[in-house]
Amino acid sequence: GQNIDQPTEMTATEGAIVQINCTYQTSGFNGLFWYQQHAGEAPTFLSYNVLDGLEEKGRFSSFLSRSKGYSYLLLKELQMKDSASYLCAVRDGNAGNMLTFGGGTRLMVKP
Amino acid sequence: EAQVTQNPRYLITVTGKKLTVTCSQNMNHEYMSWYRQDPGLGLRQIYYSMNVEVTDKGDVPEGYKVSRKEKRNFPLILESPSPNQTSLYFCASQPQGRSGNTIYFGEGSWLTVV
């Protein structure tokens, strides 16, 4: 099985930087994903890490440390439209490469 | 256009009345799965399928059935729905192998059981 933890809620100010952490425990780690989800909509893919280090994609970056079972999503130059839930998900190679999601972090961006 | 299509998008039904939520993908993906999403609990996997005629239980399979007779379709069946199955349901598909780092979600199906 897998255990994935991330904060339930965070608040940040427009234009600022916010870091959303995710810790996990899994027996067959085969990649970590970050998804953005606006209320009532399907999750949309943000990033994928399978090796240690930082992956940068525009205003969003994601970091992975496999030895620590830790990842973070970094959002820069926050915009109001970034208010959403951010889901950390881990793929388990011992379970058919299926994903297990954390509970999600609801981010509120304030003016 | 790459798509995962699920129907119905919205449904109110009564306890005990069998229903099926269909899911179809046009990308020839091997993997398909069903999730339910409830407030504070995130996305929880119900069932998944690694290929035709290969299905397995996820984290919360009780009260659900699935079938995978064709590669493109993966219907979710609620034989006797109960109010605790009121939820938002997502179907997802992904390719097998090294290219399998992108998961495609359907738009979601809001189900209310009264």
Image (cartoon, coloured by chain):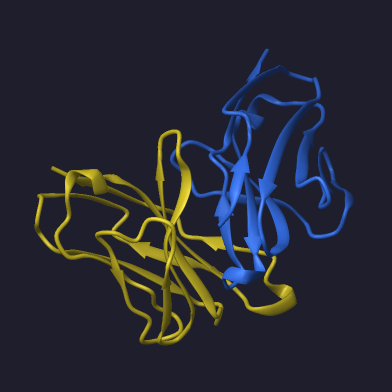
Chain colours: A blue, B yellow
Identified at 50% across, 49% down, the residue is: A42
Residue A89, image x, y percentages: 63, 51
Residue B23 on image: x %, y %: 38, 69
Q: Image check: B48 left or right of B21?
A: right
Q: Residue at x 37, y 63 (%)?
A: B6
Of all residues, the one furthest to the top in this rendering is A111
* Residue nearest the viewer, comparing B88 with A4: A4
Q: Nearer the viewer, residue A109 or A87?
A: A87
Q: Quadrant of the N terminus of chain B?
A: bottom right
Which of the 4 image quarters holds residue A32?
bottom right
- Residue occupying the point 17% across, 49% down: B82
Q: Which residue is drawn at 45% across and 33% down?
A: B40
The quarter of the picture where the C terminus of chain B appears is top left
Task: Let me know if residue B1 appears in the view.
Answer: no
User: Picture coordinates of residue B68 (x, y %)?
Assistant: 38, 81
- Nearest the viewer among B56 and B102 is B56
Q: Is residue A34 left or right of residue A102?
A: right
Answer left or right for A2 relative to B92.
right
